[in-house]
Image: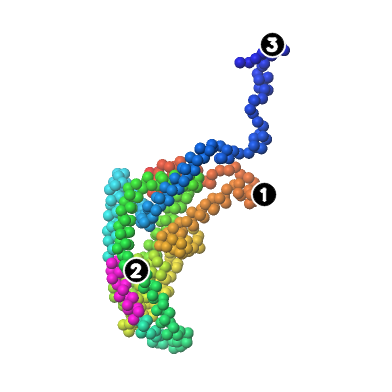
Amino acid sequence: MNQPDTRTGAEPGPSAQAAQPEPHAQSPAAERNRGPQTLRSMLSFSERVDLLIRVVLAVAVSIGCYFIIEPFLTAIVIAAILAVVTWPLFASARSSAGGSTTLPALLMVFLLIIGVLIPSSFLLIALAQQIPKGISVIREWIASGFTIPPAISEIPGIGPWLHDQLLFAIDPASLSTTMQKLLEPLSAALLNAAVNVSNILLQLALVTFIVFFFYRDGAWFADRVQALMKRVSGDLSNELTKILVNTTRSVVFGLVGTALGQAVVAGIGFWIAGVPGILMLCTLVFVLSIVPIGPPLVWGPSAIWLYSQGETGMAVFLVLWGLLAVSSVDNFLKPILIARGSSLPLALIFLGVFGGVIAFGFLGLILGPILLAVGLSMLQAWLKNPILAAKLDPDRPRRSRRPIKLEKRESTQTKGNSLDNPSDQENTSE
């Protein structure tokens, strides 16, 4: 209630009321001098203790969860990659089933069992039986001494000269000793893999079990991953999710395409050289091509077998064919296939594949390019930030800060599944 003026007896007008300053108001300069409040000043002692307890419990639970799923982490990652790669096929089956997810998921798992699990089981069992025999043959060949094949001297034009040069450059005794040293760790690794065939088959069975739930509950998992990406990267979440899906599919398609190409080229060489069991050998090349030195483990012993049978010329041909033809498929076709659907330059594809293998083992073939693609995209988005651009180039006119052409996708992205068509998310919905 307004108090009357003691001198005039009149109540103060609106202008006088507005002129009176608020008792607790402070000037902007005083606000700036006081500085921002810290978390310590905003929370009481008991609240800080409660916050510390929550953080410790969250870290402890996270560590415990990691140790629980760590034995199955490889199977979970492989199942997730398999679900992402084959998701378009599952989406088609789901549409045909009227939107149901359980029956299409069972159908996809059945196809994986028929097309992957059963053939891989027979192949691994046969390979485990043949590994000790192959190692014994190689050891006998090395122990017999290394000699330059006579067929080299029969090469028209350069045969005698090449034979003399090899004889001068190669010491057969030291070469046999070196090969014996190299064979020991390789044979130990192969024998260990043969013994662990049951563990590999168990992992494959676990992958097929886990991938069923990724198919059936894929939309739920995709929404959680999208929410996590949004909490971490903000407006970049849609773009990073699209990069994750596209890069995963590109790397897998590149590996499978390269494996198929190497198997076909190696099969042609086996057919020309007259090696028996071409279908089995081509299957081995296809499976082992995911390892950088996989195909030589197939055509190398085949060349040794030809040499032991007196087919020196065909043995030399098969070695040259493997080095020049089969290896060139891996060196040139794989980066091209991976780069077709990925945003990474060709040089980073090389670094991602080989660096990933060194850092993470087998899964690094896929994780390496994915991590580089995500890191490159985040770096590009950071460099496009208008504030950073103004600091790097002060003479450049400032623009109004707008999201990096990602915000308009957010409204439509939340309606659909990011796995269905990641290359065209802004135009599709579930």
Of the 4 image quadrants, the one containing the C terminus is: top left
Q: What percent of the width, then of the height, locates residue 4?
A: 66, 13
Magenta highlight range: 123-140
Spatial CA distance of label 3 from label 1 is 64 Å
Q: What percent of the width, then of the height, locates residue 316?
A: 38, 80
| Sequence-first tag of 1 and 2 | 2
Q: Quadrant of residue 333?
A: bottom left
- Residue type, label 2: Asn
| Circle 1: element type | loop
The residue lying at 39 percent from left, 55 percent from top is 70
In magenta segment, residue 120? no
Give the residue pinned by disc 2.
Answer: 192
| 210 relative to 7 in the view: left or right | left
- Magenta span dominant secondary structure: helix
Camera-nearest residue between 33 and 379: 33
- Residue type, label 3: Gly
Mark 2 crowdedness (10 Å alpha carbons): few <14, some 14-19, many ≥20: few
Q: Depth-wise, is mark 1 or mark 2 nearer the camera?
A: 2
| Sequence-first tag of 2 and 3 | 3
Spatial CA distance of label 2 from label 3 is 105 Å
Q: What percent of the width, then of the height, locates residue 170?
A: 45, 84
The residue lying at 67 percent from left, 16 percent from top is 12
Instruction: Determine the residue located farthest toward the right in the rendered image.
Output: 7
Is mark 2 in CB contact (under 8 Å) with mark 3?
no
Give the residue pinned by disc 3.
Answer: 9
Camera-nearest residue between 159 and 369: 369
